[in-house]
Image: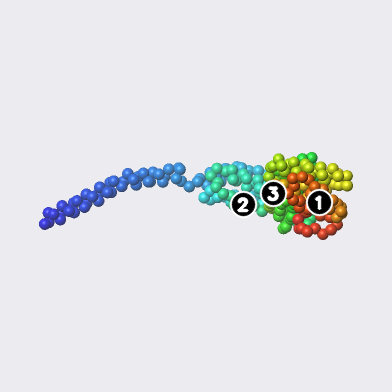
């Protein structure tokens, strides 16, 4: 009986030892995999050094930066919103950075919203003159130094040009891009040119072609026409609408034209280009 018990204990011990030895290669393999570079967390220190190098410019001299778990945090101040946006772009290009937390404050002058909006409108009025800006109707609103751009742009060149001008102006603290770029369409291109001829080719209305900042804006989206800008009288507004409606192939015409010296329906936002 005692012999049988001793035999059973020996068998159990052998099985236990065998299981231990069999698991050793797997444990060693797991430890090896855990220590391999591919399984390690991103090298935050290296990413921070690269970020520091990319932001080693005079416009970024008052910035602070840190990288933790692949997330780059930018803080401090810059003189223009353009520099804040540029720092963000540079940080996103750093190897090992998976996200960017942009806490940069735009210093520069504090300009009253109404005054800043007037200056920005003046700046944008003649943007892209000679490049078909009559087919852009970009609106602008300013609140607490934040410039919000909306409306329609003929293409991405016009949109990017407007954003660039706003971003570089002192006093702008942030920029919101709500501009809709009109979809490319040969049919819409044909309607645009037909609308242009119908409106500006009419002797009663060609006075609006003299000053590029005071043109009647014509935007088209899938056959639907929208008119923006300021005209001298209610009679001019009605004539423009009639001429626009007479173009073949147009599904509808939305008349957003404002009459000079009359209250605007959107006083906090102005169509500027």
Q: Residue at x 72, y 47 (%)?
A: 223
Residue 102 is marked as: 2
Mark 1 and mark 3: span between their CA atoms? 23 Å
Q: Secondary structure at mark 3?
A: strand
Residue 168 in sight: no
Mark 1 and mark 2 in contact? Answer it, CB < 8 Å: no
Mark nearer the N terminus (1 vs 3):
3
Looking at this view, is 179 or 22 the one in front? Answer: 179
Q: Residue at x 62, y 53 (%)?
A: 103
- In the displayed structure image, the side of residue 19 where residue 153 appears, left or right: right
Mark 3 surroundings within 10 Å by alpha-carbon count, few (fewer than 14), some (14 through 19), many (20 or more) = some
Image quadrant occupied by the N terminus: bottom left
For label 1, the residue is: 241
In this rendering, which labeled residue sits more in front, label 1 or label 2?
1
Looking at this view, is 51 or 212 the one in front? Answer: 212
Q: How many marks are shown on the rendered structure?
A: 3
For label 3, the residue is: 180
Mark nearer the N terminus (2 vs 3):
2
Residue 186 in sight: yes
- In the displayed structure image, the side of residue 41 where residue 89 appears, left or right: right
Residue 7 pos. (x, y %) = 15, 52
**In this rendering, is residue 234 above or below 164?**
below
Mark 1 and mark 3 in contact? Answer it, CB < 8 Å: no
In this rendering, which labeled residue sits more in front, label 2 or label 3?
3
Mark 1 and mark 2: span between their CA atoms? 46 Å
Residue 228 pos. (x, y %) = 78, 51
Mark 2 and mark 3: span between their CA atoms? 25 Å
Residue 196 pos. (x, y %) = 80, 43
Mark 2 surroundings within 10 Å by alpha-carbon count, few (fewer than 14), some (14 through 19), many (20 or more) = some
Looking at this view, is 162 or 226 the one in front? Answer: 226
């Amino acid at each position: 009986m005692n012999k049988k018990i001793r035999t059973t204990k020996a068998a159990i011990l052998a099985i236990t030892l065998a299981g231990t030895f069999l698991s050793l290669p797997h444990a060693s393999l797991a430890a090896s995999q855990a220590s391999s570079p591919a399984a390690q967390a991103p090298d935050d220190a290296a990413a921070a050094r690269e970020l520091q190098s990319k932001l080693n410019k005079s416009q970024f001299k008052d910035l602070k930066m840190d990288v933790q778990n692949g997330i780059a945090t930018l803080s401090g101040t810059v003189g223009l919103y353009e520099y804040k946006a540029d720092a963000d772009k540079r940080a996103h290009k750093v190897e090992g950075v998976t996200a960017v937390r942009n806490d940069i404050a735009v210093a520069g002058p504090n300009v009253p919203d109404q005054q800043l909006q007037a200056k920005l409108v003046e700046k944008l009025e003649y943007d892209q003159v000679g490049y078909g800006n009559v087919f852009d109707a970009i609106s602008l609103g300013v609140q607490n130094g934040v410039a919000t751009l909306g409306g329609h742009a003929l293409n991405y060149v016009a949109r990017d040009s407007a954003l660039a001008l706003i971003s570089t102006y002192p006093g702008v603290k942030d920029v919101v891009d709500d501009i809709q770029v009109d979809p490319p369409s040969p049919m819409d291109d044909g309607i645009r040119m037909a609308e242009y001829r119908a409106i500006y080719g009419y002797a009663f209305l060609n006075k609006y072609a003299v000053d590029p900042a005071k043109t009647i804006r014509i935007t088209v989206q899938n056959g639907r026409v929208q008119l923006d800008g300021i005209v001298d009288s209610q009679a001019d507004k009605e004539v423009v609408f009639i001429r626009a409606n007479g173009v073949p192939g147009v599904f509808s015409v939305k008349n957003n034209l404002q009459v000079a010296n009359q209250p605007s329906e959107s006083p906090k936002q102005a169509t500027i280009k």
